[in-house]
Image (spheres, rainbow, N blue to C red):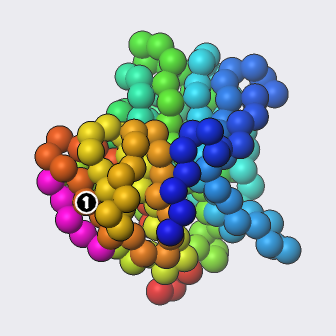
Amino acid sequence: MRILGPEDFQTTAWKNGGGVTHVIAHKEDGGGTVWRLSIAEVASDGPFSVFEGLTRILTVIEGQGLDLHSPEGVLKALPGRPVRFHGELPVDSRLIGGPVRDLNVMFDATRMEGSVTPVSGPLRETVAAGEMAMLLCLDGASRVGGTPLAPGSVAMGPALALELDTGARALLVRLAPAGR
């Protein structure tokens, strides 16, 4: 198991100036991106980057949300509600009431299955994901394998022993090989 704080994330500004991305972790191979976990800070309306061949799950963690406009209609990205869409889908986002932060989970769905589940305490559970399990602590007292996890920090590993106290909130990400 690894625990990463925000100071461990790799931060890059968007080319369009509309925000920044904090890459938590990623896996790549000769076939390209297998999976990527990141937190985006969205400061203004604008187009999303295209990620050909990847599935995206976006979950707003701060702010009122985003309206994601695409040729398929409008997806409502509201706080704590994961929204799944294809990475090649042209998306233009519009902020609902100001800037937001969101967790982005991207993966090659031909090779991986992924999910994001909001969890809250009290909770005691061991999670095995296959490839990777990740817990992002949003607020409250959380521990993974008995180690405290500060808000904004992430615990990662193939299996995690989670403990969330009453009132604690987190996002649980699971990534596993496709077809498992």
What element does badge 1 sit on? Answer: strand
- Give the side of residue 23 with respect to residue 137, left or right: right
- The magenta region covers 122-126
Q: Residue at x 32, y 56 (%)?
A: 143
Q: Nearer the viewer, residue 71 or 65?
A: 65
Q: Main secondary structure of the magenta part?
A: strand
* 179, above or below 77, in the image: below
> Per the image, is 123 magenta?
yes
> Per the image, is 97 magenta?
no
Q: Nearer the viewer, residue 175 or 158?
A: 158
Q: Residue at x 58, y 28 (%)?
A: 41
Give x and y (percent) for residue 5.
54, 44
Residue denoted by label 1: 163
Q: Residue at x 41, y 56 (%)?
A: 135
Give x and y (percent) for residue 71.
59, 38
Identify residue type, mark 1. Glu
Q: Nearer the viewer, residue 46 or 102?
A: 102
- Is residue 41 visible from the viewing direction of this image? yes
